[in-house]
Structures are given as structure tokens and as C-alpha cells.
Image (cartoon, rainbow, N blue to C red):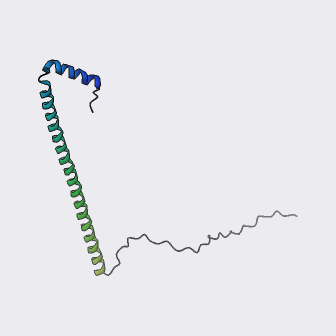
């Protein structure tokens, strides 16, 4: 995330030692560690809450899909009942079957040719 190398960390440590002083540096580092820990816990808490919300969205979406499927089944039953009451067959959900073939290729019959006009020999 941050591109901080060893030389940069050494520079920060030297400046911190010069500005804060050797007596107060351990206390400052401890305070900095506490603040970083609190920030990390806060980010973890927010991340967990967001993941829970995302999970709740998935559950809501799944419940909505189930409700839609139940409605479709109810409508299908209603159509079938209406079709039975009207004494007609409901449209099948299967595609229409093609005519069974005998397995033989279709025969092509030649058409008779017209006789050509013959020239008179005589």
C-alpha cells in the first residue's frame, strides 16, 4: 500500500529521536502503536459490517428470486386449471417432435428428357 523502504524508516526514526528526544521517544512510540491498533480495529469493524451488509443483500436477492419463482408456479397452475376447465390441452413445454424418418435418403426421380428434333435425311 505505502511504498516505504528501510532508508525512509531510518530517516523518520532519526528525526523522531532528534525532535522528541531519547527520554520521551518510547512513550511516543507506545502512543503511536495504540493509535494504530485502534485504527486497525476500526477498519476491521467497518469491513465486517460491510461484508454483513453485502451478505444481507444476497439473502434479500435470493428471497426475492424465490418469491418470483413461487408466483410463476402459481400462475402456471392457474393456466393449467383454466385450460382443463375449458377442455383444451395446455401448450406443451416440449418442442414439437419431427416426423420420424425411415432412415433412407429421399429418392430423386429423373424427369424424362424431351426427344430432340431430328433433321430430315431426305
Total tally of numbered discs in the picture:
0
Q: Residue at x 17, y 21 (%)?
A: 16
Can you give x and y, in whole percent of width and height, for residue 97 in the image?
A: 47, 72
Q: State the image coordinates of residue 87 (x, y, percent, origin top left).
A: 32, 81
Compared with residue 119, is residue 78 higher up or lower down, i.e. above or below? Answer: below
Q: Which sits in the foreground, 26 or 39?
A: 26
Q: Considering the image in quadrants, where does the N terminus appear?
A: top left
Taking depth in this image into account, of 82 and 19 the one nearest to the observer is: 19
Q: Name the residue: 72% across, 67% down.
A: 114
Q: Residue furthest front?
A: 23
Query: Which residue occupies 12% across, 22% down?
Result: 23
Q: Where in the figure is residue 52, as x and y percent of width and height?
A: 19, 51
- Residue lying farthest to the top in this orientation: 18
Residue 29, picture quadrant: top left
Relative vertical location of residue 43 with respect to residue 103 in this rendering, above or below: above
Snapshot quadrant of residue 66: bottom left
Hey, which residue is sitting farthest right in the picture?
Answer: 122
In what quadrant of the picture does the C terminus appear?
Answer: bottom right
| Nearer to us in this view, 113 or 79 | 79
Query: In this rendering, is residue 49 above or below 60?
Result: above
Figure quadrant of residue 120:
bottom right
Q: Does residue 9 appear to the left or right of 114 in the view shown?
A: left
Amino acid at each position: 500500500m505505502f511504498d516505504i523502504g528501510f532508508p525512509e524508516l531510518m530517516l523518520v526514526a532519526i528525526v523522531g529521536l532528534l525532535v522528541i528526544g531519547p527520554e520521551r521517544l518510547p512513550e511516543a512510540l507506545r502512543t503511536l502503536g495504540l493509535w494504530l491498533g485502534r485504527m486497525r480495529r476500526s477498519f476491521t469493524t467497518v469491513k465486517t459490517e460491510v461484508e454483513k451488509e453485502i451478505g444481507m443483500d444476497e439473502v434479500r436477492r435470493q428471497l426475492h428470486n424465490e418469491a418470483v419463482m413461487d408466483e410463476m408456479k402459481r400462475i402456471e397452475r392457474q393456466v393449467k386449471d383454466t385450460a382443463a376447465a375449458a377442455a383444451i390441452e395446455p401448450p406443451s413445454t416440449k418442442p414439437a417432435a419431427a416426423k420420424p424418418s425411415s432412415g433412407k435418403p429421399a429418392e430423386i426421380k429423373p424427369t424424362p428428357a424431351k426427344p430432340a428434333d431430328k433433321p430430315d435425311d431426305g
